[in-house]
């Protein structure tokens, strides 16, 4: 193969790789969205204990085995995410151990 043919081949393979990565990130982002509850647009109920009752908060676990930062590169409709609008924290406990 000539040098020009090799360069054309490499460019074609790089383009194909970008497309595969984009599709992979899109599928992965859909799975991440399924893990989190959707934002509820209804009027939220008043938080806390009812009047006259003492409130209580569930304590955080003493030991954290693993921390993960999850983020989406593309929205479920296939558009790139340019700016982070909000972040959330979640604590997931495995009670089966």
Image (spheres, rainbow, N blue to C red):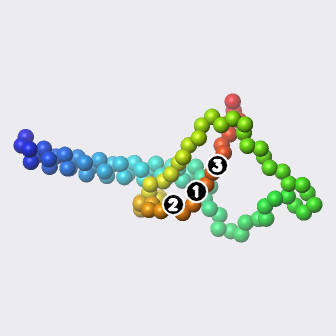
- Does any portion of residue 68 appear in the rendered image? yes
The reply, left or right, for residue 59 in relation to residue 67 is right
Q: Which mark is residue 84?
A: 2
Task: Give the foreground label among 3 and 2.
Answer: 2
Circle 1 residues within 10 Å: few <14, some 14–19, many ≥20: few
Q: Is residue 67 above or below residue 46?
A: above
Q: Are marks 2 and 1 in contact (CB under 8 Å)?
A: yes
Residue 14 place in picture, x, y as percent: 25, 48
Q: Is residue 32 above or below residue 1?
A: below
Kindly state the secondary structure of the residue where label 3 is placed: loop
Q: Which residue is mark 3?
A: 90
Q: Residue furthest top?
A: 97
Q: Quadrant of the N terminus?
A: top left
Q: Quadrant of the C terminus?
A: top right
- Does any portion of residue 77 appear in the rendered image? no
Q: Residue at x 57, y 60 (%)?
A: 86
Q: Measure the alpha-carbon separation of dots 2 and 1.
A: 8 Å
Q: Residue furthest bottom?
A: 43
Residue 17 place in picture, x, y as percent: 29, 47
The reply, left or right, for residue 80 in relation to residue 92 is left
Residue 83 place in picture, x, y as percent: 47, 62
Q: Residue at x 69, y 32 (%)?
A: 96
Q: Which residue is mark 1?
A: 87
The reply, left or right, for residue 56 in relation to residue 32 is right
Q: Measure the alpha-carbon separation of dots 3 and 2.
A: 17 Å
Q: Measure the alpha-carbon separation of dots 1 and 3.
A: 10 Å
Q: Which mark is residue 34?
A: none
Q: Camera-side residue: 19 or 58?
A: 58
Place residue 38 in its image quadrant. bottom right
Kindly state the secondary structure of the residue where label 1 is placed: loop
């Amino acid at each position: 193969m000539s040098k020009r043919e090799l360069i054309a081949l490499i460019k074609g393979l790089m383009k194909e790789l970008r497309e595969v990565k984009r599709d992979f990130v899109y599928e992965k982002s859909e799975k991440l969205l399924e893990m989190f509850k959707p934002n509820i647009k209804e009027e939220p109920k008043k938080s806390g204990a009812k009047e006259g009752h003492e409130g209580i908060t569930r304590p955080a676990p003493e030991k954290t085995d693993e921390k993960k930062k999850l983020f989406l590169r593309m929205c479920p409709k296939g558009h790139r995410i340019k700016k982070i609008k909000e972040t959330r924290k979640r604590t997931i406990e495995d009670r089966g151990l």
